[in-house]
Amino acid sequence: MHKLLIDEPGAERLLLGNEAIARGALEAGVAFATTYPGTPSSEISLNLFQVSQQSDLYFEYSTNEKVALEVAAGAANAGLRTMCMMKHVGLNVAADPLMTLAYVGVRGGMVILSADDPNMFSSQNEQDNRYYAKMSGLPMLEPSSVQEALEMTAYAFELSEQLHEPVILRTTTRINHSSAFVHLGPLRKPVAKGRFNKDPFNYVTVPAVSRRLHVKLLENMAKAAEISENSAYNTVTGNGRLGIVCNGVSFNYVRDAVNELGIAERANILRVGMSNPLPTDKIKQYLNGCEKVLVVEEGEPFMEEAVKAFAQEAGLTLKIQGKGEGLFSRLYEFDPAMVRRIVAGYFGVADIPKEKLDLSDVPEIPARPPNLCAGCSHRATFYAVKKAAEGLDAIYPNDIGCYTLGFLPPLSMGDFVICMGSSVSSACGFSKATDQKVVAFIGDSTFFHSGLTGLVNAVHNNHNFTLVILDNGTTAMTGHQPHPGVDMDALNMAGYHRISIEAVVRAVGVSHVTIVKPFKIKKSIEAIREALAFKGVSVIISQEICTLYARSLGSLKPRAFQVSDRCTNHRDCINELACPAFYLEGERVRIDADACVGCAVCAQICPENAIVPVKSA
Amino acid sequence: METLRLIIVAVGGQGNLLASKVLGEAALLAAIPVRMSEIHGMAQRGGVVESAIVFGEAQSNIISDGEADILLGFEPAETLRALNKCNRETAVITNLSPVPPFTVAIGKGTYPDLARIQDLIRAKTRQLIAFDAVALAKAAGSVMALNIVLLGALLQTGRLPITAEQLETAIRTKTKKAFVDTNLKAFRLGYEAAERAARSA
């Protein structure tokens, strides 16, 4: 049985934050869960996916976050307890349904998990999604520990049903990817089937209805504000006059700081766990007892600006600061010593920093930049496109996935990336605005996520570029989740339909469509050359399974290659492909037989044909 | 107990996350609070994996520069790179068997000299325990046991609030059954290697 399905109330288990969130949902009897995978949220959905195969939980990997939220909105309004999880930028994609779902509300409890990524460990930006709660008018909870992640998730379902509104649970990477011992509660059996009761004058958001629903939303927010005033998650610790307002992981750094600085007796810490709506009266009362206040929050001055406004309303003139010169930054993530130093400085006590080491005599240590895997099909495709486009003044919009790494030398196949799907649509713009040749790259999962609409746009508006769809048969970057183009039968999972990328591309009217096998380099280059010469939208579908995925499925049959004595040290292999299976032994190029999977791309480009299979003994 | 802050650095695939998990389970057996956080980066793609493990009453689960009490490095250049986490009182344990970064492997970078790495760490910190943990893992039966060899060495320092029995129990319950004997042997080999290193220091 899945470890999160073992009903052992009171047991203490070492859980990853994301496992604790999944467990919290199961303890609340979640019946319906949807997602599009994205770090740092991915393990929540992975666990629920596994659980769904052994329980009544319905789970799906939806095509994108907007779809996931709309699917969940249907289920929640049929009365089911529903969870929809995504990374922070995913909520941008889902923002359209989010704003109006807040008007309509939900019948069954609905929790929307937004996993923010301060410091951008694995994201394209570090936007602060607390503003989505404010903009939509939805209640928001923010855990400070793994234990709280479990408890708040379970509570969020209750809160949602109390208010008939979705609740946003906002985490950061240091909650999602931290582990601690967690006390488990009892599991609750999900109610797996609901019924939708028609009520078009509350569900169909034509203007006349929405005008009324907005009033209802404001009433719900007023109720939520009362709950926030008395929430056990908005807590004041200490009786001192030195005020510190904080949230999330910053609460931990603040507690350590006041203890280590010896000012715990003088401090008065307000930890905000329910951060929308903020507990206005509680904060005013709290400010009244403080002589000055420091707001400690990663990201934007979300609480700081509100707290200053509350002080103004209460006629208080105490000093309140957070972001600014010598104080906290809007950039990146916080750490305990940073918080301690700024707390010490703000309240005029001596910091006790550990003396850092003088590292000026440490030699330069070569970096370990991420690299496409040995035998990665993307490397082969990038190489083939590069060769096919030789002599052309070409630009390469790229997209979000493992293949974003193609922008690094020596491949250097990535000139513009902003968000999921942007390769296709930005290619439309580049091709109209310039006389440069445009070749865009997008992965298979990303194509279904948000590449399709761009392609329809391109065909309809008669743009001129080549789209290369890198079809490696899985969502590789986030851990090999399925997508609509995946053959689920091969995974022994029944009840799915597979969508053919080729059929979709042809159906929207692309006339020049070619499928290539990227490990056949010469043929691929020829096919790509033809596509580049085509005037209009041409599509190359480059099909080869992700080598890591093939390994995990047990279908990879590695056949290592080696460099023979014919090698005359051109080093085209290393200099143009940079496959991590290569290394130098003295001045000779060698191939690590354990790393090589036998894609044979290097063998095909070697001018001396010096790279040959290792002879089986 | 006093808070104890441990940083583990490794290259993807060296088994650092399992090592953290075993330590966490042993801490539960010892009834010591523990909080951990991990940055996987692009681990499967040859990147660095860093874990922070905080034992004791502190609430934070990450470790600031200069604040690690112990640094455990699975790869010598990565150990050197993580010296920014250390102070003069930090104990450092490192495997000496390198995993050259790709740039070095293809002759476009220079791997720091192993003797120099050890001299630098020894001069700057309280203690260095350095040995070839890959060789010991192989001697125990599998190169995959590298992580458990290093846990043996870590425990030998006497700095952890955990006993050898507790850690061995965690190895028995939290590592794959087929590897338990290999792992227990790896644990003892690592422990003994650290004893020898401490004596000769």
Image (cartoon, helix red, strand yellow):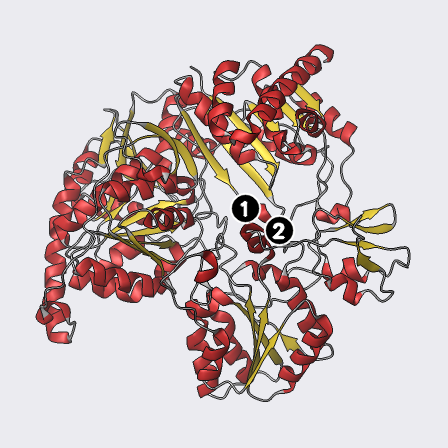
Disc 2 packing (10 Å; few <14; some 14–19; many ≥20): some
Element at label 1: loop
User: Is residue A335 depicted above or below A568 in this figure?
Assistant: above
Q: Is residue A529 left or right of residue B89?
A: right
Q: Is residue A216 left or right of residue A495?
A: left
User: Is residue A546 depicted above or below A249 in this figure?
Assistant: below
Protein chain holding label 2: A
Question: Disc number at residue A47?
Answer: none
Question: Disc number at residue A370?
Answer: 2
Q: Position of residue A598 (x, y in %)?
A: 71, 57
**What residue would you read off at disc 1?**
B41
Q: How many marks?
A: 2
User: Is residue A533 depicted above or below A148 in this figure?
Assistant: below
Q: Quadrant of residue A262?
A: top left
At horizontal 53% and vertical 15% (from top left) the residue drawn is B164
**Amino acid type at image mark 2:** Pro
At horizontal 57% and vertical 40% (from top left) the residue drawn is B49
**Pointers 1 and 2 in contact (CB under 8 A)?**
yes
Q: Is residue A584 left or right of residue A335?
A: right
Q: Foreground: A73 or B198?
A: A73
Q: Is residue A248 visible?
A: no
